[in-house]
Image (cartoon, rainbow, N blue to C red):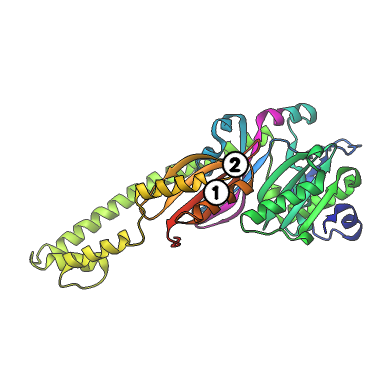
Amino acid sequence: MLIKGRNLMEKIAFAAKPAAASNKIKFYHLSCEKGELPLAGETEAYFIPFRTATVFPFSFPFGRKVNLRNAVSLTFRPVLGEQESKLSLVPQVTEQRVNLTRGAAWFVAKEEISEYEELLGKKSIFLPAPAAFASEVGGNGLIVWHEGNSSCALWLEDYTPQLYRYAPDPEGGAEALAQWMRSYASSIGKEIPAEDIRIFCSEDVSLGELRRAAAATFAAAPGLAHLDLSNRGASMAERYEAFFNTAFRSIKIASAAGLMFFILSLVILIQNKYMAESFAAAPSEVYRLAMGEVSRSPLASITKRMRLLTGGGVQLTLEGTLANFGAAWKTLPAGTDIKVDAIRYGRERTEIEGQAPKTDNIQQLRDALAKNGFAVKLGDVQQIPGGGMRFTLNLTEGGREK
């Protein structure tokens, strides 16, 4: 059973304290009457049902914002293709530790953003409409926003966006969109419980209710509080990252100079320490220093280690892989709309990358491969702007998945 936002608004008192920054922000959705002018120092923030927006979660093994934009661009460039130059990129960081940066990358067509800037002003903050109510599901669940003749939905996990989708009413309305999002989550092995779904209609949400919900969300999720999908927000984020890149580059140069002198001193110390030892004992000593253990036959020991590193698992021949893939492809039902972009062959694992309009098509290909000598593991499944999905399948032989 899907929970309507109207009833929820009547039952819940927003007890969470707004974030400090939100005191200077006036929240609106497109259908509400403003009825007031912003005071000096106040900023207008609009929750907008973007038609062209899409979002991809990311996780990188570094804790600073150095080259974050470049890392995001390189990661999602194969998905975006030729559309990259037409899209505005805004990274949203939701968690950052010493060796981890986690968040989501928002992409919106620059043309659509410009349309809203002409309508609402170039100094306004733009946010995806469902994000205002993220606190209503505790940062874990699905929010659907219906406004005018269309709906948009946002799926969150720990306040990190996982998927955004826009759909006009002729495609089924808000509840149909919610079911589509649940089906997508199920197709990648996740679940959105019915009790974690909220549907809000713009005509049922007053300006006061919107502002209380948005303030609670900003207090609970600093990552959303710093998000701005306007062209001005994207430019400011890019300049901010460029500044830190330059600063960290200077620090790295200074650190590299100190590290070079340290390494030079260390090399001289090691050379003086071991130069007097006999050549007969040198191989064993080098092995001990490198591997941390003693060996009477260092050459044999290192050879054994190399064999272990190269692995000895089940190996796929190129001919066998192509033959099995061809056999699986022939068993697909007529009219199956799947496009294979790349086959990356490896002796122990082969990766298939392609595009399909629906998750059902991906499952058909997966089943066909599983019946033709492969163990199949589903990799990334990502929504493509404009429709369809990009997917990867990892193939191993004889039910021995890696």
- Identify the magenta region: 91-114
Instruction: Describe the element under mark 2 as helix, strand or loop.
Output: loop
Image position of 359 with respect to 80: above or below? below
Q: Nearer the viewer, residue 14 or 202?
A: 202
Name the disc covering residue 336, or none. Answer: 2
- The residue depicted at 87 percent of the width and 57 percent of the height is 8
Image position of 292 with respect to 176: above or below? below
Q: Quadrant of the N terminus?
A: bottom right
Q: Is residue 154 visible?
A: yes
Q: Nearer the viewer, residue 76 or 361?
A: 361
Residue 80 spot, x, y in % from top left: 57, 36
Amino acid carrying mark 1 in the image = Leu
Q: Residues within 10 Å of mark 2 (few under 14, many from 20)?
A: some
To which residue does mark 1 refer? 365
Q: Are marks 1 and 2 in contact (CB under 8 Å)?
A: yes
- The residue depicted at 87 percent of the width and 60 percent of the height is 12
Q: Nearer the viewer, residue 334 or 52?
A: 334
Q: Is residue 367 left or right of residue 230?
A: left
Is 105 within the magenta? yes
Residue 365 spot, x, y in % from top left: 55, 48
Q: Is residue 133 left or right of residue 354?
A: right
Image position of 171 with respect to 112: above or below? below
Q: Is residue 343 left or right of residue 198?
A: left
Labels 1 and 2: the sequence-earlier one: 2
Residue 84 spot, x, y in % from top left: 57, 33
Instruction: Name the quadrant containing residue 334.
Output: top right
Q: Quadrant of the C terminus?
A: bottom left
Q: Residues within 10 Å of mark 1 (few under 14, many from 20)?
A: many
Amino acid carrying mark 2 in the image = Thr
Name the disc covering residue 124, or none. Answer: none
